[in-house]
Image (spheres, helix red, strand yellow):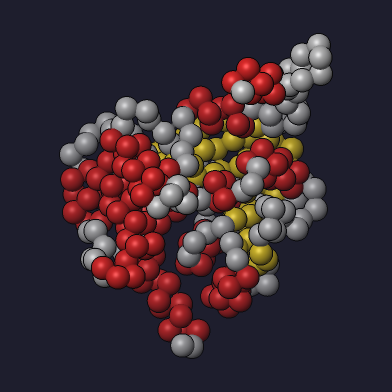
Amino acid sequence: MNMDELEQKYLLQYKYSLPLRQQLNAVIKSFPLSGRAAKTFLDVGMPNPIMSKELRRAGGSWSTVVRSPKLLEITSKILEDQNVTCLGVNGELPYLDQSFDYMIVALDILPAMSSTEKFLKECHRILKPNGRLIIAIQTKRPLSLITVLRNKLAKRINGFTPINIALSQRDIFHLFNAGYNVIACENYSKFFTEIARIKEYELSITNCATKKKAPSYWWANQLDFFLIGAKGHISVITAERKQWRERISPVLADGRSMQEAVLSQRL
């Protein structure tokens, strides 16, 4: 497959994937309305190189970090750009301190990190003072059918899935509080689209034998049209960089942490 055919393949994948297009639109809405040409941007972990290509059309000076070495050569050729590198094993970003005005992190990157706090600290390191982190996160609502379906799928495949790793609004603010001020939130993927996305993910990891047909996002989008005022189940968070403050865990008089004390009581 030559490069033109490869690019066409990714273009079609992007065109027919409503979640990818919704994610990109929500990200672009979070950009500044003016002055983009003078800003530096970094996009991290886009699952499709066409998304990185579309982001560049918004203006500004761009660099890209891909999820795996496999995507590195493909993305570089599609973007016709040398400013493409690969994410480190532990989420390391190969850039100098305070290099970027804006950093965009794609969905599923945060759940893949061994330590979300360390990754957010690494993002903080390469952002300029008052720089902004734009990151897509699955949201969790305890009484939602979507939460039930996510957990059911995770249980079916022994929990090995990022589809059920979601954060409540409280979790999000707590996670970002060490080094960021959350200033905006753009939601996407309403009820029926999210059901279709969960089903598509399930088929992608269990479809070897059954060859079932993927769900129709067109119908999901039509049904979601009638859910006026309903919030999406994925949030694109915009957080402004502030001074980093390490969280200090409470320690008891005997030197044990609160967590160790609780565990010892349960044993």
Farthest-out residue, bottom: 2
At 66% from the left edge and 38% from the top edge, which residue is drawn?
117
At 76% from the left edge and 28% from the top edge, which residue is drawn?
246
Vertical order, 136 against 217 (above or below) = above
In the image, 237: left or right of 191? right
The C terminus lies in which quarter of the figure? top right
**Where residue 145 sits: x, y (%)?**
28, 35
In the image, 99: left or right of 173? right
Name the quadrant containing residue 79: bottom right
Q: Nearer the viewer, residue 267 or 151?
A: 267
**Where residue 173 sits: x, y (%)?**
56, 27
In the image, 233: left or right of 245? left
**Where residue 129 sits: x, y (%)?**
74, 38
How many numbered discs, if any?
0
At 27% from the left edge and 41% from the top edge, which residue is drawn?
191
At 51% from the left edge and 24% from the top edge, which residue is drawn?
170
